[in-house]
Amino acid sequence: VSPDFVPSPDMLGLPVVPWLGRLLMSLTLAVHWMLIGGAVGGTAILLAAALRRRARPDLANAGRALGPPVIFFLSMGATFGIAPLLLVQVLYGNVLYSANVLLAFWWLGIVPLVITAFYLLYHVRRRSAEERPVGAWAPALVLVALGLVAAILVSDTLLSQRPDAWAGFYHAHGGKALFVDDATYAPRLAFALLGLLAVGGIMTAIAAKGGLVHDVQARPIVVEAGLRLAAVTSVLWVAAGVLLLLLVPAHERDALLAADGAGPWAWVAAAALASTVVTALVARRRPSGARVGLAAAACFAGLFALAYVRDVVRQQAVSPYFRLSDVPVNPQWGPFVVFLAMLGAGIVALMALVYLARAPKGKE
Amino acid sequence: LEYPIFELPMLGGGMLIAGIAIFHVFIAQFSIGAAFLVALAERRAIRDGDADTRRFLRQYARMILLVPYVLGTMTGVGVWMAISVVNPRATSALIHLFVWAWASEWVLFIVEVASIYLYVYTWDRIAPRAHNAIAWIFAGASWLTLVIINGILSFMLTPGAWRPGEPGGFWPALLNPLFWPTTLIRTLIALALGGAGVMLLVALLKDLAPAVREKVTRLAYRMILPVWLCLPLAGWAFAVLPGRAQTFLQGGAPVMVVFLGFGMATFVILAASALVGMWRRDYSVSVFRAVLVCLLAFVSYGSFEFVREGARKPYIIEDFMYSTGVTVPGAAGVDRRANLTRVRADGVLAAAPWALPPGRTVADLDLRDAGPPVFRAACHACHTLDGYNAVRPLVRGWSAAHARYLLDHMNELKPAMPPFPGTDAEKEALARYLADLGTAVRIGGPR
């Protein structure tokens, strides 16, 4: 492909030093994945509860208490997604926007899909609050909607790393097709979806342990269901990761595992994901708060390392067309400090909210 | 330019953005106003020991706050997604300039999400004053998001002392000349929208206790009334507009003058209706009247947005980037690919490889073949062929010479149009293409 087809990096230069931008992007992306995982995993449990409401009335009852935390996870997850989306535009806007336009109709479909998921979850929550049976169709459709969003995002990320495929794809489809013409697309998507389910199982257990599930009797059942989901899907997640590694072209795999590239981080990610499997299995046998917390910590470490590996892979993929190190940097330290102050104030506000939410009813 | 071109048949990208943005701003500003109304009403109800009003607020908090909030948030992301596919260069510039402003807004979004859910799901579970404090945190965070995004939007029309590539440009850009008047205008409109929306809800609830109806409606009137202050604030905003935008509003752009008039009139009518309602102690508002008030509030904010968007033409970022994505000659130092000086020398197609037919290069194209790609590169950002803002009806009956004359003097004859961004040969190719388009719709023989 002619380099002319790859837009130049933004003319205003980078407003942040690259290492800081990459660090913040990987960190917030990992939190985003954890929270969206909570929504996906929680919805999967809602689906299981709806499908098995006769065989498992205890699970069906517990499912009634799960609506609000799942909605909360989806809201927070979508909100946390804004930060990595901002930073990826700052660092790789030229390739990201190109991929967005190449998938335009699908890309624009993300918002209606997420809104649909929200209102279906509200429907589930309302039926639960009214103690009416919840049909399996609603959580199933939520999973379809969120799965489609994952399919679009995986396609977008993959396409942003394949400028060689842009021109042909553009002239063939004009923004109306998903980019699936890559041998690694299906395993990438499977890896993402299984990861969300595994993370979601752990996050659901955390939600129940942490009191986000208001019904006290439902909590142990939700914890058990979440950890069971995590135990099964985390094994499959790792298997999908191995399959993905085998399917990527040899030169990409070599680059991925090279000691001077993503290699060390790839091994950290692998170790953390293996720890997630082990801790999830252990926590499932004896679900104490500490064990569930340990599984969540291992999972977060794995996701953070994965996010960083993903960034290194992206850099390698686009390096024939542009290098981050060649982009001029005009750091905005003053506004960054104000952002940090705002972040501090936001944390204080969140702590105040938690304090207020624990104020006993009789106490003014 | 530079990027692949998004083609939305009939509607065009501009209409897509407008459609999502109108919905988003309406919902988001209503949500902010409603947050203040709920916080205020709850505080008074707690102070007065008014269980009925609290029950009303509890019953409808989800409808007033949570549902609009989710729609507002997601459509806000939708606006960004739409602008990023319709005009990636402008989106990229804004993101690179304001990333920390958006990051600060993101922190506020997190506070908003946490507070709205706690507010809705802790009714009667925690102490009332603590519950009300959560509402104030939500309202405060929501308003601050308005302040930040308004700084970015007003920058696009009045960049003030900001110069591309100069260090330390963030603050003059954010706190630009339009920042304060438009922040205040948006705040007043948000309060009015919140008041109007709740008035409609109260009108729809037939079995609401009269005392609750009275209290909530009175509060709604009080939130709508200050909207008259938008009149002097609009004067302030007008005074800091670029000269070109001022001439648009002084008669240079009749449609904008009409919308400005609509906006001014609705501010007055809204405030007057609230004043009359308060004076007559009319707290039993009919559904028809409530709908009318909501429509007026919608027209007032819609006019404000229409005028703001229209006054910016031919720029997408005043005095920096035209709506075509080409930057002004003064930005040649930072933009080495699609600056006006450069594209006039090298050709717009050299900066727009995606506009070319598959497998063709600029060197392959003759004068006739080059017309459609030049149209896609230079006109497509605002115009469709046959849909919204269609070119075909505009060029009906044009000869190539006439088209050429108009392209030569485009932004002199029509100040809302950017200068033609290409070489003489490209201009000639476009003129011929436009003439062909005009011929195609003519009934009858050749020109």
Image (cartoon, coloured by chain):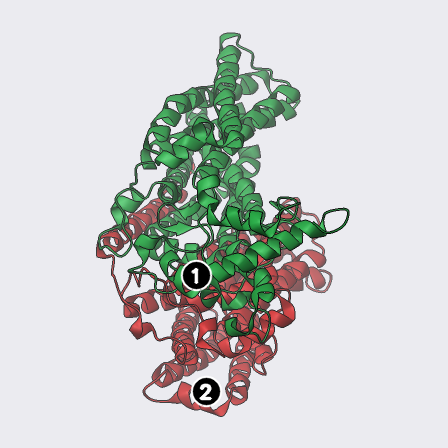
Q: CA distance from mark 2 to mark 1?
A: 25 Å
Q: As displayed, is residue B392 above or below residue A152? A: above
Horizontal side, residue A68 vs residue B190: left or right: right
* Most distant residue in the top direction: B280
Q: Is residue A120 visible?
A: yes
Closer-to-camera residue (B246/A349): B246
Specify which label sits upstream in the sequence, 2 or 1: 1
At numbered mark 1, what does the secondary structure look like: helix, strand or loop? helix
Q: Which residue is mark 1?
A: A85
Horizontal side, residue B346 vs residue B282: left or right: left
Q: Which residue is mark 2?
A: A252
Residue B280 spot, x, y in % from top left: 53, 7
Q: Is residue A363 visible?
A: no
Closer-to-camera residue (A142/A314): A314
Residue B179 spot, x, y in % from top left: 33, 37
Q: Find residue A52 and name its label.
A: none
Horizontal side, residue A141 vs residue B123: left or right: right
Residue neighbourhood size for the residue with mark 1, other residues' Cα within 10 Å, grouped as few (<14), some (14–19), many (≥20): some
Q: Which chain is green?
A: B
Residue B27 spot, x, y in % from top left: 53, 39
At numbered mark 2, what does the secondary structure look like: helix, strand or loop? helix
* Most distant residue in the right direction: B444
The answer to which quarter of the image holds residue B204 is top right
Q: As displayed, is residue B158 above or below residue A63? A: above
Q: Chain of mark 2?
A: A
Determine the colour of chain A.
red
Residue at 57% from the left image edge and 69% from the top image edge = B366
The reply to whether discs 2 and 1 touch (Cβ–Cβ < 8 Å) is no
Residue A350 spot, x, y in % from top left: 36, 48
Q: Amino acid at mark 1?
A: Leu
Residue neighbourhood size for the residue with mark 2, other residues' Cα within 10 Å, grouped as few (<14), some (14–19), many (≥20): some
